[in-house]
Amino acid sequence: MATPAGKPVPVPTRETQPYWEGCRKHELRIQKCVACGHYQFYPRLYCTACMSEQVEWVRASGRGKVLSFTIVYRPVSPAFAADVPYVVALVTLEEGPQMMCNIVGCPPEQVYIGMPVQVTFEDRTEEISIPHFTPV
Ligand SMILES: [Zn+2]
């Protein structure tokens, strides 16, 4: 799937449906293991710490810090030509898991490692919203 401009639109699966439902409500959801308390992202059918299948969905704080990032000057497809330069980052959430995302809401040259950020959402279609992060 893609938007009219050609940007990709994720297709929810059985594992990721609760995540995308949360994004649609502008709520960042991650999984928490009922057995050991481990938080994880991306969604899986079992806990990556203890292999328990008792994982539940919880709302994350939406806060985190930039672990690493790069600035993209050459768009990966024409659909992203208007967006360059943009930042692709790895953000460590307060709960522990890391997410690959875009940093938006500031010039790319102002992004730094350790920068506190919070989640924000881009409504890409009526059904799918994409989480990005923005400086706190
Ligand atoms: Zn566990």
Image (tube, grey):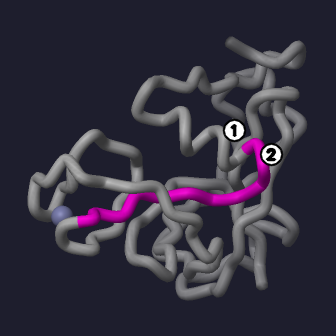
Give the amino acid at mark 2: Val
The structure residue drawn at horizontal position 78% and vertical position 62%, both measured from the top left corner, is 120
* Residue located beneath label 2 in the image: 84
For the N terminus, the quadrant is top right
Nearest to N terminus: mark 1 or mark 2: 1
For the C terminus, the quadrant is bottom right
The structure residue drawn at horizontal position 11% and vertical position 53%, both measured from the top left corner, is 51
Looking at the rendering, the stretch of residues picked out in magenta corresponds to 24-34
User: Can residue 85 be seen in the rendering of this structure?
Assistant: no
**Dot label at residue 127:** none
Q: Are marks 1 and 2 in contact (CB under 8 Å)?
A: yes
Q: Secondary structure at mark 2?
A: loop
Q: x and y percent of residue 129 in the render?
A: 76, 40
The structure residue drawn at horizontal position 78% and vertical position 28%, both measured from the top left corner, is 127
Q: x and y percent of residue 121 in the render?
A: 79, 53
* Residue located beneath label 1 in the image: 74
The quarter of the image that holds ligand 1 is bottom left
Q: Is residue 61 left or right of residue 108?
A: left
User: Can residue 133 be seen in the rendering of this structure?
Assistant: yes
